[in-house]
Image (spheres, rainbow, N blue to C red):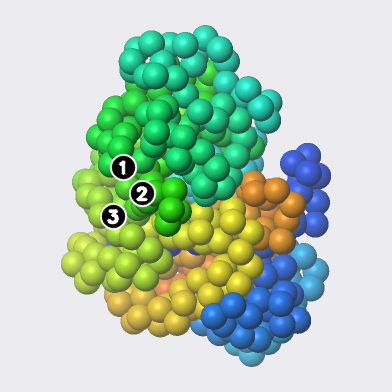
Amino acid sequence: MARAIVMVLDSFGVGAAADAAKFGDEGADTFGHIAELCASGKAEEERSGPLQVPHLVELGLAEVSFGATGRYPAGITPAQHCHGRYGWAQELSSGKDTPSGHWEMAGVPVLFDWGYFLDKERSFPQELLEQLVGQAELPGYLGNCHASGTEIIERMGAEHCATGKPIFYTSADSVFQIACHEETFGLERLYELCELARKLIDPYNIGRVIARPFVGDPETGFKRTANRRDYATPPPAPTVLDKLKAAGGQVISIGKIADIFAHQGITEKHKADGLEALVEKTLEVMIKAPPKSLIFTNLVDFDTLYGHRRDVAGYARALENFDRLLPRVLAELEQDDILILTADHGCDPTWPGTDHTREYVPILMYGKNLPPHNMGKRESFADIGQSIAELLELEPMDYGTSMLPQRL
Ligand SMILES: O=P(O)(O)O[C@H]1O[C@H](CO)[C@@H](O)[C@H]1O
Ligand SMILES: [Mn+2]
Ligand SMILES: [Mn+2]
């Protein structure tokens, strides 16, 4: 019996989706724009020249980009022969957020609208703020606005440390984020505050409360730590993770997958800090995981360190690093295993603002038994969940079309 290994390159979109205009994202292209800036010598920090991702290209990445946008990315030579079974998928879910993207790839698109805090300033309802301050016995709060998480701790970190007031902020996503200093405020206290916020915020239909701990001081500057924790609302229906767990399979979360699925349908979880450590952890798990396992890894750095920060060279470096590690992942595949590389939304680092972008995502599948094929445009990320259900011999999911070859 096979195993499925899914690695999410968080935010690695491959071109504006058909409905991108609704999100103000017409023309966004995370992969294409990174490649373009690399090829024109404008992404030279700690790397140089055209984007080098030959192993991803062998799995079909250049063809996927061509299919999604009508052109090959600048500076990328398409592979003579692709080894992958690949396509590009549009999102059925109404939002371009992380939970929607992940749940949809697990077979459960989010067809309802999330609640959002749309006002850029004074973003949160007064009643919610009063409840939080009262019940958590806080001296008040800072922020209460849309912000980039790194920028707001630079701006308000000192006042937070001096007053003990937590920093509340949001974005175009359905999120309530709380930034607090790990030492002066306390990490456990921040988590407790987020748990309270999670309960109070449920009537507003918000996807996630996120704890954003940081360290540092006003002299040397403030820095976020790896102790981020996401408090997601649970998926609206059983995902392929739940179905696999119920069928006695293993569902192994690496990185923030367990948080994104509100810890549902998970049998084992591992955390690691940074792209390389997350790939190493995936390799470690691949050596041991039994048949009928789903190994599900989220590579968050692409999004958090580079996409939202609009750092093109950083994103390119991370892609090149991942590409260098990819042969080791391929070497660890057993005969019947299938590797799926994909993304949950875009976050074009050349795009205005700091939010996600509505894009097609790549689906690059590879297995020793899997005939290579260009599977074209996919109607939903749920094709991933349906493929996993078929591979691991589960009941079919309600959404999605399997990308596995038809059995004779
Ligand atoms: O700017 P930071 O704090 O990284 O926030 C980003 O991370 C959040 C969750 O992925 C998104 O809502 C986005 O705004
Ligand atoms: Mn994401
Ligand atoms: Mn993000």
Q: From the viewer's perspective, is residue 1 above or below residue 328? A: above
Residue at 68% from the left image edge and 53% from the top image edge? 359
**Label 3 sits on residue:** 271
Badge 1 crowding class, 10 Å Cα cut-off, few under 14, some 14 to 19, many 20 or more, is many
Locate residue 227 relative to residue 45 in the image: left or right: left
Q: From the viewer's perspective, is residue 244 above or below residue 85? A: above
Of the residues tagged 2 and 3, which is closer to the observer? 2
- Corner quadrant of residue 77: bottom right
**Label 2 sits on residue:** 215
Instruction: Give the camera-side residue of 386 and 164.
Output: 164
Q: Is residue 7 visible?
A: yes
Q: Amino acid at mark 3?
A: Lys
Badge 2 crowding class, 10 Å Cα cut-off, few under 14, some 14 to 19, many 20 or more, is some
Q: Is residue 59 visible?
A: no
Q: Earlier in the sequence, mark 3 or mark 1?
A: 1
For the residues marked 2 and 1, what is the alpha-carbon distance in whole angstroms? Answer: 6 Å
Locate residue 254 relative to residue 36 in the image: left or right: left
Residue at 55% from the left image edge and 30% from the top image edge? 143
Label 2: which secondary element: strand
Horizontal and vertical percent position of residue 146: 62, 35
**Label 1 sits on residue:** 182
